[in-house]
Image: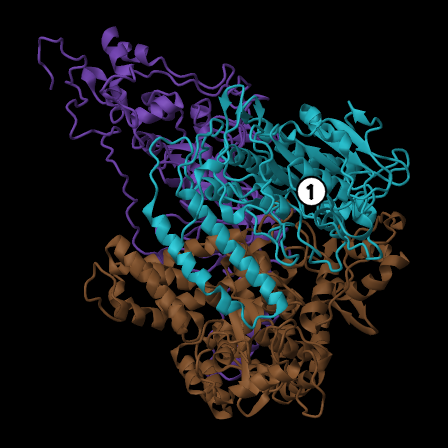
Amino acid sequence: MGALVLAGALALVGITPAQPPDQPSGKGTPTKVALRRITESQYRHTIADVFGPGIKINARFEPEKRVEGLLAIGSAQLSVTSSGFEQYFALASSISDQVLDEKQRATSVPCKPSNPTQADDACGRRFIEAYGERLFRRPLTESETLARLKTASTGAKQAGDFYAGLKLALTSLLVAPEFIFRVETAEPDPANRSQYRLDAYSKAARVSFLLWDSAPDQELLNAARSGAIHTRAGLHQQLTRLTSSPRFEDGVRAFFTDMLQLDDLDNVVKDPTIYPKFNQSVSDSAKEQTLRTTVDLLVNKKRDYRDLFTSNDTFINRPLASVYRIPFASSGDWAPYTFPQSSERSGILTQVSFLSLFAHPGSSSPTKRGIKIYEIFMCLPTPNPPADVDFSRVQDSTKATIRGRLLDHMSNPGCSGCHMRSDPPGLALEHFDGLGQLRTMENGAMIDVSADIYGVKLVGAQGLGKFLHDDPRVPACLVRNVYAYGAGRATGAQDGDYLSNQTKAFASDGYRLPDLMVQIASSPEFFKVVVPTGVQHPPSATTAATVPLQKSGGVRQ
Amino acid sequence: MTKEAPIRRHLIATAVAAIALAFPGSAAPQQLSPSAKWTKTYVVEWNEPAMYYGAKTGVTDPGTDCPNGTNPSPDWIQVLVDAGYTLEEAKWLRNPANPTRSPVHGQNQMAFRGKDRANVYINPTSTPDPGLTPVSGTIAEGLNLDDDENTGFTSPTGEKGIDNNFYKALGCWKTYRGPHRLSSGALTFNDAMRDGAWTTVIVVAGEGADPMNDDHVKVGFYMSNDKMVKDGLGNIARDYTFRIAPNAKYEGILPARTSNGRIVSTVPADIMLRDPSYTWDLELLRARLNLEMKSDGSLTGYVGGYRPWEPVYRGWVNARGTVIEVLTWVQLPAVYYALRRYADYSPTGPGGEKTHISYALRVDALPAFVMAPDGTKEVATVESYKAIAPKEPPRPALPFQIVDGIVPDPTGKYQAGPHAVILPPRASSDARQ
Amino acid sequence: MNFPFNRRSFLRGMINGTAVCVALPVLNRFLNGSGTAYADGTKLPVRFGTYFWGLGLTDTPTGGTRWVPSKTGYGYEIMPELESLKPVKDKVSVFSGFRVIGDGRPNLVHWSGHASILSGVAPAAADRFDGPSFDSKVADAIGTATRFKVIDIDASASRQPVSYSTRTGTTFAMPETTPLVLYQRLFGSAFQDPNSDDWKPDPSIMLRQSVLSAVEDQRQALMAGVGKDDQVRLDQYFTSVREMENQLAMQLQKPEHCQACVVPTAPKDTPRSATVDAVRANTKALAKLLAMGLACNQTRVFNFVHTAGISETYIAGESKIYHQITHDEPIDATLGYQPETSRLAGLVMQAFGDFLIELDAVKEGAGTVLDNSLIMAFSDTGYAKIHSIENIPMFLAGRAGGRHKAGQHVHTTGESVTRVSLTAQQLVGVPVGEFGTGSMRTARPITEIMG
């Protein structure tokens, strides 16, 4: 069976890689190695890019799923529920209405119909192919085009209006799975027929979503069409173009929104009797503060990534200033601000975003904060609490501070194993309450913020910031996250050497994020094909030709 | 907000001075602008006239201040009859169903109750004093404005000599009477202020080392164009930043001293503040203040003086006399007479016309950051900004025009006035104006 | 695209001469193989729903129980945490002593309990079920004749919307979380008033159908070369497309009159809050809309989440959240249970009482919507302090059109929760003979309560 299929694959030698995938023949067909639902921000960016920023998008997007720390990994596990599809459908109709509005159509339709009250296949085709390529992120197949042409002409006939037909065709493009899901396709590698590589359009999409959080623009699509993206020089040219653009900021924002889990800020609730200053404006501002800080430090100033934990250069607006208890010295909306030493703040660990996200509605939570510090910045997830913890032996503590009560509970051996690990970083942040406000006393007692992290003793947020700055696992975790985010899959033991080499390069380059992204995106590993199980296709070979064929595995490009 | 200026500043200043002395010819570097040792800054979150509610329950109940409770609503039909209208005319005018009575602006003809149907709103003495029941109690909040313990009320905490004739005259009137924060007037104006209509900030600055006990303190009241923000419980949120907006009129600076956290003004001065009322201008002659810096960081107390009483009356009239009378249960001429009767101060001296009346404003303020007018740094001292204030913009126009205390309807068939025909003509005749 | 349906497969239910909402013609495409979705033409359409709340009810190993009645059978006494059920006691059956049997799989806290109840098997990982939730089977059986096959609701104001309804085990439904959003889904622009006199078929619907057919045509091409897991996800996507097609097809027919249906007015938007009181108010408002949505035949199946398994609710002003209290609070030596936790459990049950009362408030035929429904209510755990999956509280509310002999307390020692799940499915006419896997596999429904 394997030989037959392999023979079929070899028979495809004649196919040039730039052609779009053909109808399935059952033999050596391009393999779809991943199906990732695009995120809300990717959807919005794409629509703005393709149809202009004036298109209004008002819909509920289905919730995303965080897997191994990243929504980007979870996107490969999501589908579309019927309620979600209703939303996409209504949104697609609304966008089509706006694009083909009488005032808009002069700019949005590249040709004029011969009779505006009737179907016009020639003009319809031009419209469908142009937008289809941008939305599907690759040229449409003939059958895909014909299906939409049929819809367009049915609609034009029924309504007596060419543009009504186009609206329907565009709607069907916008609800198609090829738009809503990033379909990553692998094709036989022309240099080595027994191996697979990501096809050019899939590569273009990976690069574009990583660096601009949006679908490939026309220039990038052309680099895919010509095959330039398969070459070192061609790829490098695109990477340089994308990272030099102001749109690179969008990509960095999307990355850090995912890594720092800032998307949850939309849904944080706080108890107004305990934290009256909190409101939606504060949580929106908190997210913006962290993103501005990160972009300014890492992209505009090209500083060392580790400075995020120690540098107190940031941005604030008026609502945040009231939470931080500082004056807001600007007539604009946002102003740069540097926290003094005395504020005890230390980089993003002590911004309202992190502190309020990982806390309770009415109090801080050293445990939550500790767990997230390990998970987000050191890529060390914490196992779930065991079900058989004997809570009957947990004594009610009378200590005044949360720290005191946690330490009392830790005397229970069933709990101490995890808590002794997860709590200390959070304990160092206890001078910041559940909203992120500085407080040094709790119930009349001074809060002790000393912590012992596996023998490393530190005090307070600034001590913790320095700890994270100096720990080599921190930059290694960023490297892992950039890779996992861009490639859209969890990393494992097999990626160890690659990630370790990338981390060394990151370090010797001064820990600069833009260079890291380019470095990773230009490495062959970034486009590595991992064929999923259950595909009735020639399985991919591993990198070394001498290793026997396995059921599934990685292939180098 | 408290801020301690670093000692360093004084050392530098001394060093600079020393250098200037040692090298007489050298160009002395610019002196640092004088700043206080400490500042505490606030935003006013509630202000209302100092009153005293003498009942134990409710908002209008009988009490020691007003034994019969809040002044009841006048019988408007009787008022019109007393003014010379026939009973039939009076009933017709008061009937909400009749076409001359506007559901929004009231019955304009009510204005014309004076002699020869003069407009009593603009000419209150054209009608005899209807008599506004004054306060008959002996307790009032406020300040001792004349340093005389024998004139005036006793404060709720026992201090004698509280001069507050404004309260005496008007304290039983519905719009002013009630427990703290519950009188209808206080609610109306403070709701508007807290929703962004205006913002007043207070800066307290001192020379000494201890803000709680300092003999050299200044208190400044300023306006800001930054709106207050409400928190999750509906209260004004603390710690917001407000930039001083220099104002040619509304600014008040008083010298004071602090003692155990209480700020008491030392020398009276004339100031003008933004009044929480339709009048807007709160001129206070010989103003004083007494404010407490509380342990929770807030500030509460009184600022008072002698305010001109006629603008108070005019303020109510210009808010549509017809509406104010009915909503607040008062005959406006009675307010005029009452204020005139109890006015107790003449700016020209003891013999002069008493154009002013003793008054205090109760103020509650929360900690806030206050920035100097250019917005780049916090205020470090209390000083006047009137010189750099822009020309005052006109008061925002209302969607309707108020003329002489009523809102005439230029397109209306019926026009209120001294010669208006009140009752509709019988079916046969046709005498509409 | 043509839907070959005919109106002969039409049912009309009449009770005592009062017309009630009737089934719409069933599209051949969606009938199950045996065609027994409508068992008996004279029976009323029954509704089914799940109702979930987190953190269980109080029943401690040391002896204090605040919810298990001492009497079994009819006439069980109202226990302290069940006070809110008093007004509808005769329509609610209580099930105690049922447990999850993990067959060696660890108890995944705040997950294994309800995952087992819904999917019949203890899951291997804490973010998935190892099988579809059985409400999807019910939806397939009785939900194909309404505009929506199923409506999912989450009242909890949690960080992430909560739903435990899944066909694949990995993707869960997207619930409506506020009254306004639920209103827009049920009664918004796409709603067709069944009692309106001037209904006209909307020609644009056929155009929208053509949009979807262009998508469906590409299905084969897309599925080629797709891995197993991705196929499952694409299947779900295409199922969603077909459900939309079904909705559009429904909208092409004049809906039958529904005497019980009274179109409500749009609710106001309320600020989001996760306090116990706010979540209770949200539950009540959502229940009211849901009840009318059922009466207007917009759906027959629903899933309602009051609070998540890891509930985030709290009493306003207190710094500890309910979940933390279940673990922190010691057992009172005299009382034998945790008093504050029990109080909170009672407050949470108030919302369930409100929910049932809203369904009972809509008259339908000779009874109410509640009489014509079956709601299975359950939690993630029994004794929350120790994440126990023994004695998980379960209820069946509503008379299921008469098939449920309600008002009984059924007690067992150590039987599987799947028996209740199986009973629920059979009561609403799902053609199943057994439910569950391994030690939780059962073919024995609880016949005492079946009519």
Q: How is the image coloured?
A: by chain
In which quarter of the view is residue B158 placed? top right
**Image quarter in which the N terminus of chain C is found:** bottom left
Amino acid type of the residue tagged 1 in the rendering: Trp
> In the rendered picture, chain B carries what hue?
purple
Expressed as whole percent of the image width and height from the top left, the position of residue A161 reads 24, 57
In which quarter of the view is residue A314 placed? bottom right
The chain ID associated with circle 1 is C
Q: Nearer the viewer, residue B399 or A33?
A: A33
The residue that appears at 44% across and 73% down in the rendered structure is A137
Whether residue C273 can be seen here: no
Placement of B153 over or under C419, stated as above or below: above
User: Mark 1 sits on what residue?
Assistant: C53
Count of numbered badges drawn on the protein:
1
> In the rendered picture, chain A carries what hue?
brown
**Image quarter in which the C terminus of chain C is found:** top right
Placement of A295 over or under B315, stated as above or below: below
Expressed as whole percent of the image width and height from the top left, the position of residue C211 reads 39, 58
Q: Nearer the viewer, residue B356 or A169?
A: A169
Classed neighbour count for the residue bearing mark 1: other residues with Cα under 10 Å, few (<14), some (14–19), many (≥20): many
Left or right of residue A54: residue B41: right
Whether residue B365 can be seen here: yes
Which chain does the cyan colour mark? C
Placement of A90 over or under C34, stated as above or below: below
Placement of C283 over or under B196, stated as above or below: above
